Structures are given as structure tokens and as C-alpha cells.
Amino acid sequence: MICSSSPKFVLPSGGGRGLRVPSLPDREIWSAPPEEEEGEEEEGEEKISVMASSYDSDGSLRGPSSSYPPSKKLTTSNYLRHVESMAKVPSGAGSIPHLNAVILGESLASEENDLIFPNVEFSGQALVSSPQKYLEMYKRSIEDPAGFWSDIASEFYWKEKWSKEVYYQNLDVREGPVKIEWFKGGVTNICYNCLDRNVEAGLGEKIALYWEGNEPEFDGKLTYNNLLHKVCQLANYLKDVGVKKGDAVVVYLPMLMELPMTMLACARIGAVHSVVFAGFSAESLAQRIVDCKPKVVITCNAVKRGPKVINLKEIVDAALVDSAKEGISVDTCLTYENPTAMKRENTTWKEGRDIWWQDVVPRYPTNCDVEWADAEDPLFLLYTSGSTGKPKGVLHTTGGYMVYTATTFKYAFDYKPSDVYWCTADCGWITGHSYVSYGPLLNGATVIIFEGAPNYPDSGRCWDIVDKYKVSIFYTAPTLVRSLMRDGDGYVSKYSRKSLRVLGSVGEPINPSAWRWFFNVVGDSRCPISDTWWQTETGGFMISPLPGAWPQKPGSATFPFFGVQPVIVDEKGQEIEGECSGYLCVKSSWPGAFRTLYGDHERYETTYFKPFPGYYFSGDGCSRDKDGYHWLTGRVDDVINVSGHRIGTAEVESALVSHPHCAEAAVVGVEHEVKGQGIYAFVTLVEGVDYSEELRRNLILTVRKQIGAFAAPDNIHWAPGLPKTRSGKIMRRILRKIASRQLDELGDTSTLADPSVVDQLIALAGV
């Protein structure tokens, strides 16, 4: 168990395993290469020259030169072993001003580990402008986490400062209950810091939210003043119907401005919001209502995504009937009328319970006193759903989450006050909480809220929105990148996109060929990509590039964020050094970490801390290359064991997608009487390419060549589309059932963007 206080944190010599630091000799950073490397072959010498000549002695990027920077030593201990290698000579370096775009249907995507360097202009204005600057900040964040995070936290408003003990942690179940606390005793309010603080700083007339409707002709906007007033009106209404500090409010809304508005209103009065993605079925919604027992449910009568109208109110009605059968009744269902999707008269209604938002909320005052909260008071519940069992209610608290999401947003996107930011995620997921609502607004950013579908009315919609609002930071999922990549470059090149400055990727590992397309075609080879790894449980980014700071490798999340100590362990929980693959864990806590699973702390400990005592277990596999770059390989439960070979599904998918005729792939494991498990691949082809046995053989050969014969798919299942939620998540549970021909066990498909895809896949089984 570790406690720490400001200003100085001394690493314990024995103590808790969460901060164990192996005592190994210090190593020097930024020294000239050892003399024996001078005898390497010519190609190696060129790599050394390019990397070394990229930075001045102060660590800033500069133009090519044949000389090394003067030796500037940054002495570190072994706990920096996973980042210190960035100051050495990376493999694969070369004079790469940009990469050649991969044109689908014409040429194979290269899977070589190229390095993409930031240019001088970008790095010169970046918040973290060099590996040297990053290493200095990272070193302090590990050696003095209390001081590092206290300095950042002090930039926000606290009605009362935290106690001398900045954080407390025990990640080792062998030493007692797992417990994490940050800024305990500090009193603040995240809504106040998102809105009032920015208005008081003179940003009242700055646009906080732009809203883009499903139909291109519908849009809207709110300044920080406008948003504050509307949040206060809703907060006053909630108080008036009996919502108090600590009460739960379930939110089932589409991507309207009223969704982040509702989250902020709950936070303002100390209520705990639980946003449920407005695509979950009535059964799933009812489960969450029963678990958290809300005072109020807030919804919308309907939403239109693309040409399809989704009747949300009917889903809520059915969920409230189901929850009542379980003994949980909700007295108030506040319903927002979305006239572009459905008129009032067509909305199902229960008098006495259902209330129209527009009839009551605008009547309330535009100011509302803040309910001040302890840093460790609950902020929100967000349920993660598995293929089986009860959903897990991930609980995040106020202070640490606020500080961490704001800081990760600022540095991972190199945020500038002039930026216009668009994250395509729905607020029903953690990305929408941390990087649509809280993180950007805490930084006073201008945010895009998009109600519609990215391919409606055509596949150029994203780039139309980018040009319309002059979006400079664009953050999306690899699934969307691959989908738009499949539709061809024409939809992208039709639009300017000159405003784009930084791109981002979230949700799953992005395969190198999709990374290259995103970089070359969407970003015109001039925008760095923040390929972020994090989870609902982590609250914010854990491993991510910092734009302008260091060279990127397509498909790699690169290096850890400040304060994060990732380790790769083997099946026995032993840390593996150097180039390796294994289970990704985190030692020591960070401010944004979730504190428990609501009502089930035992499950919290069993799932995340018992597999490898002393560590947070992410559930993901990870490889670290010889340069220290991290490569996420997907969930460890997505690992297929073929004749003793453990094969990550993401690795096979990446190989398949590298074929010029493959637009997207999803791989699952199926039982095999000889090998234990076989590899079953669902493959979506580039538009206009026909299925053929020759193509099937070529796809298998591609995997054999890139990974090995042991990873060759046993089955290629042609897939016109993949079953995805409206947020773009592939429903692998459904694919496993189809692959195993367990068609009577497909379960709930109501959250799919296009349920007809399932019937198409079943019809093509065996083709």
C-alpha cells in the first residue's frame, strides 16, 4: 500500500509491489552511438545519421545534417527502460518526408516498420517538441507523481485543496482490498471547471459545441455562455423533481447537444449519470436501470441515422416495463422532442410519468448553484457489456478523472485554443465521455457533435463536415477508417481538408495499411496520428504518440503517457524485458483509473487485479519491439491457440487487410478436431471485386507469407458487411456463433447498425 504527499515523493525501497523499481545501473540518454557501431554496413549508417540529425542539442527537431547533436545526458533508472530507447537509433529509419499512399485495388500495402518523422514546423510549435522534452516530463511523472499531478491539478478550480496525501494506492490483493484515491479531501466540481471557469476566463462567447444533424441542412451551435445557461436550467429541473447528490440518472439520448448538456447538468448537482448508448436493446437498458436504480430516465422520442428512423421512446417504454417487473420503478421520464426524426403526436406516451423536455426545462432559471464534491465522490457509471453475464458498472470519480482527461486531451492532440475538434464517438461510450464532453470542455475547446452516419448521404460526409467547420483535430475509429478506405479515395480528395492538423485513432489496434491510408490520403501526409490505447476502465489515454515529439511507426501506439508504467508480463506474471510479447499490465495507479465496479468490488478485484497481483491487468496482449515501441495485439481472449501457437486475431486481420482486394477482415477461433482451434476469417472485399477461389487462395497465402503457415486461415467467409453496432464496434460474439454454425444462439442483434448483415453472412456460409 502506497501513500504519497506533495511536494516530493520518494520511491520506497521495499514497500508495495505497485511501485517496485528494480535496481539496475543507470543509463545515459542522448549520448553519441558507441564506437563499435561505426563499422556497420552502409544502410545502418544512414539510419543512424538520419535519426541523430533530426534533433538539436536542446532536443528540438531540425533539418538533416551529417553530425550528431552534442551529448546531452539524461540519466534514468531502469523503470524508464520502455521509453529510453527512443533516444537511441531506431530501426527502419530513413529519409522519409512522406509515405506513398496505398491505393486499394492496385498495390499491396507495405508492412515494413517505416518511421514517420514530424516536420520542423510542427515540432517547433508542439507542446512536447522532442523526445528529450517528453523524457524529462515522463521521468518526473514517475519519480514524483504527487508533485507532477499536483502542479497540473492546481490549474483547475478547487473550492478546497486536497490533503497533504496526494494519492493512496494498493493494487496488490495480497496486501488487502484494492483501493485507489487521488486528491482525496479536495473539493471541486467538474461542470464548474468545464463551463463557469472558462466563462470567467473570457471564453463566454467562444463556440463550445457545433451540432451537425443527420441531414446536412440541419445544424446548430452553443457558446460557452449558452451552454452554461442551458445546463443550469436542466440542473434546476432535476433538483425540482427530487434528484439529489449521489442519485443516479440514466441517460438514453442520441448525439444531440442535449446529451453532453445532460451529463454536465448531472455533474453540476452531484448526481451520478449513467449514459446508455442509444442503440442498446430494451433488455440491455432495463438491466442497467435495475442495477443503478435511477431517479430519472432522460431520453428522446426518436433519432434518424442515415435514412433509418429509430424509435427510442418505445425502447425506453419497454425497458421501464421490464425494470418494474424486477421491482425498480422510475417515476419520471424526461423526453426530448427531436422533430427532425418524429413528431410529438406519433410518440408513445404515459401520462404522469413522461414529460416533454421542451415544455418544462426552458422555464427554469439560467443560473444554478454548484454542488461541490470531494475528489473521490462518484461522477458517472458506464456499463461495459460482455457476451455473457451481467454488465459491469465501471465507476469513475470526480477529481482524478477531471485532471487526467483534461491533461491527456491537451497533450495527445497537441491542443491549441484555435483548434476545432471532432471526435466521431458516441457519448454512450467512454470515448464520448472523456474526449467529446469532459476532456475538450475542460480545455475550453470547440467541439463537433454529429448526430448522423458517416456515410450518409454519401461517404464524403466526414470530409464535408471537416471543411464546413474547419476541423483541425479529427479523432475516429479504425473501423470507420477501413470503411471509408473501402469506398475509395475519391470521396476524400473531393474535399479540401486543409484545416486538418492532427488525426487520431481509438477503439482497437489500427492495422498499418489503414494507418498509412489515413495518414497519406486523409491527412495528405502532413498530419501526425495519435493512435491511442486506453480503456473504459482507465478513463483516459495510457499509451499514445504525442504529436511532434518523436517518430511514429504505422500501427504502433508508441510510448506511455505521463505517469503510466506499462509492463509486459508472461503467464507467470514475470516482467519481460526488451523485445517481447505478452500480457499488458500497468504498475502503479494514475489519476483517471476507475475505482470499482458498482456494487461488486469483488468482481473488480477478480477481473483486474487477481490475475497478476500488484498490477492492473488490461486484458490486452502487447508486443514491444527492439526500439521500445508498443504494438497492441487485441484482447487476450481474442487469442487463438492453434496447435500450441498463440495467434492474435488482430495480427491475422492486419495481414488480410494488407491484400489490395481486402477492405476489412474479422477473425475468430473455431473448434478444430486436430489443431484444437482453427482460424475462421470473415473478409469484406473492395467495392467491385468478385469472390473467387483464386482470391481465397491469395488471401491465405498473404497470411502465410506475413506471419507463417501456422497462422493461415482454415476458412475464408465472404462478408458483404460485418455486424457492427452503430458506434462501429464489430460484434465478434455473433461472428463466433456463425462460424460455429450455432445459429440458434445469435442472441440480441438489436444494437447492430444493419441487422440484415447477419442474414447475408448466414446465406454465404459455405460459399
Image: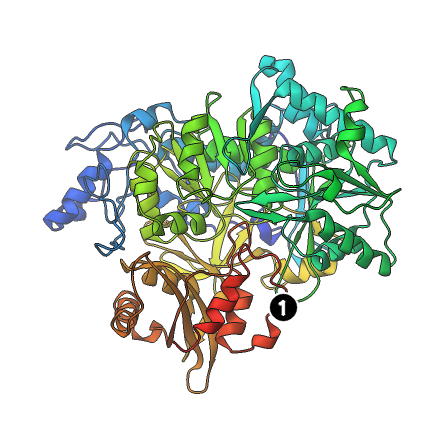
Residue 724 in the image: state x and y as whole percent. 52, 57
- Residue at the farthest left position: 42
Specify the quadrant of the image occupied by residue 715.
bottom left
Number of other residues with Cα within 10 Å of mark 1, as a class: few under 14, some 14 to 19, many 20 or more: few
Q: Amino acid at mark 1?
A: Gly
The answer to whether one can see residue 165 in this image is: no
Disc 1 target residue: 747
Specify the quadrant of the image occupied by residue 679.
bottom left
Residue 177 in the image: state x and y as whole percent. 73, 55
Q: Secondary structure at mark 1?
A: loop
Residue 249 in the image: state x and y as whole percent. 77, 42
45 or 216, which is in the foreground?
216
385 or 571, which is in the foreground?
385
614 or 607, which is in the foreground?
607
Colour scheme used in the picture? rainbow
The answer to whether one can see residue 449 in this image is: yes
26 or 272, which is in the foreground?
272
Specify the quadrant of the image occupied by residue 505.
top left
Residue sitting at x 47%, y 67%: 760
- Residue at the farthest front position: 345
State the count of labels: 1
Residue 38 in the image: state x and y as whole percent. 14, 45
Image-based side of 511 in relation to 428, left or right: left
Image-based side of 77 in relation to 427, left or right: left
Residue sitting at x 52%, y 62%: 756
In the figure, 143 relative to 691: above or below? above
In the figure, 453 relative to 616: above or below? above
In which quadrant is the C terminus drawn? bottom left
- Residue at the farthest bottom position: 673
